[in-house]
Image (cartoon, grey):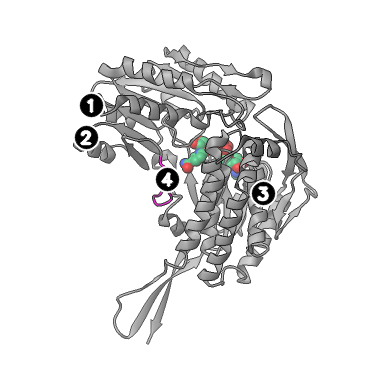
Amino acid sequence: MLEQSAIDALRVETLSARGHFIDGRSVDAGDSRALDVVSPIDGQVLTTIADGTPAVMDRAVAVARAAFEDGRWSRLAPAARKKVLLKLADLIERRALALTVLGVRDNGTEINMAYKAEALSAAATFRYYAEAIDKVFGQIAPTAPDILGLVHHAPVGVVGAIVPWNFPLMIGAWKIAPALAAGNSIVLKPAESASLSLLMIAELAAEAGVPDGVFNVVTGKGAVVGEALALSMDVDILVFTGSGATGRRLMEYAARSNLKRCYLELGGKSPNIIFNDAKDLAQAAKVSAAGIFRNSGQVCVAGSRLLVQEDIHDDFVAELCRHAEAFRVGDPLDLSSQIGAVHSLPELEANLSFVEKAASEGAERATGGDRILTETGGYYMQPTVMTGVKPQDTLSQQEVFGPVLAVTHFKDEAEALRIANSTVYGLAAGVWTADLSRAHRMVAGIRAGVVHVNTYGGPDMTVPLGGVKQSGNGHDKSLHALEKYVDLKTAWIQL
Ligand code: NAD
């Protein structure tokens, strides 16, 4: 149970300047300059992080390579790595509130959500892959009796991980935990505006017993240190979550360097489809509102396109707007806030300009659309519902990554499916119907990595999360995620 007094005690802590984390210790910025970290809660500078250079990144990669090659982690028995990672999960859980408050101070997610989705989820992820790693293993092929074909799972080497500012701990853990469990070394590049909690995870990993050099964090600008990581000849794979624009660049960097594999988890414009035969439309409206507006819409799988069957459109939208207006938007470290801050001023301005653009293309504001709480200095926006959005409009086609819902109506199942599939994205979708056959047809027909039926969202490690089309090409979570972090190596032995 979270207590406001404990949160308030942590939120006032002065934060010292943060360095990189390389070779088991925090290193000062050195030749790097410092970058201000601005809190979206009040627009004030919280602290600084090191603004890394390509030289610092190269050093971190060299350290990770040396650690991998000498086997201090890569050649440990899986059960030994498991023990360390379980200890790390315990440490994360023990420090969960401190990690969460630190993370909310630089990224702005409401603490009610962040506590579970960030710190507790990260602990669960480390525990999941720790528990898994001594239960998955290679194969013996069904060869002729005088030959033995063994398929080993070999760690790939040095993993370059680049993560975004929304849910840095959750998404970071989805990559760090399976990569470490499989025996790899890592260099992590967090988002420049949300590095603090991941730097703390690196310290906890060292405390848990991850050997020096195995898990390194280099902070700084994507176009500088991110690029250096992606261009490195000594990085074996890149795992990335972020925008499509950056994902495209990473593939180019890989092509220009050592053809490293790139696993990309990108954006979405996910359709949430409400049929008139849905069993509980009131529940559908409530869940759909949460499915777009929590964390100010800064959720990759957010149901940002609401497709409503035309005969229930007006009533359903009215009900959804009631929920949108009832959300308490405010200080993300206040337990009573249901929606926190937009992550940064540029993000807020981009959200507002999407609203304007939608209006200029003929959509109407059913609710919201404005910046609020300006007196706090922070970045807050009303949950916004735009109706009359056509499938080809900007608001239907481009990801906002903010609290702006595009509403479109449809006649029948065929039209709903056509509109659902009419973007370049394919991350998530929702379908609300009581007709089981229709639900199955929609699951089969919608091109998306995850389709929810009569619900939206679902935090569970047991299933993979990934996109199709321009939403990405890899999967985080579940045992499938481990496949990225191992190479299949065949041993062919004449008996
Ligand atoms: P972004 O692409 O701007 O940044 C992501 C990371 O890439 C940051 O660490 C950034 O510093 C780094 N980066 C930027 N330019 C780079 C370059 N040239 N070379 C190497 N690294 C570079 O994305 P963002 O704004 O931080 O995150 C929001 C995006 O992430 C949205 O599109 C959202 O949908 C997506 N996202 C996807 C998922 C998923 O699971 N599919 C989850 C969360 C967020």
Residue at coordinates 19% horizontally, 37% vertically from top-left? 437
Q: Residues within 10 Å of mark 3 (few under 14, many from 20)?
A: many
* Residue 466: assigned label: 4
Alpha-carbon span between mark 2 and mark 1: 10 Å
Closer to us: mark 1 or mark 3? 1
Residue annotated with mark 1: 277
Badge 2 amino acid: Arg
Tell whether label 3 touches label 1 (CB within 8 Å).
no
- N-terminal of the two: label 2 or label 1? 1
Q: Nearer the viewer, residue 257 or 223?
A: 223
> Overall secondary structure of the magenta stretch?
loop
Question: Can residue 250 be seen?
Answer: no
Q: Quadrant of ligand 1?
A: top right
The stretch in magenta equals 458-465
Badge 3 amino acid: Leu
Alpha-carbon span between mark 1 and mark 3: 49 Å
Residue at coordinates 51% horizontally, 47% vertically from top-left? 121
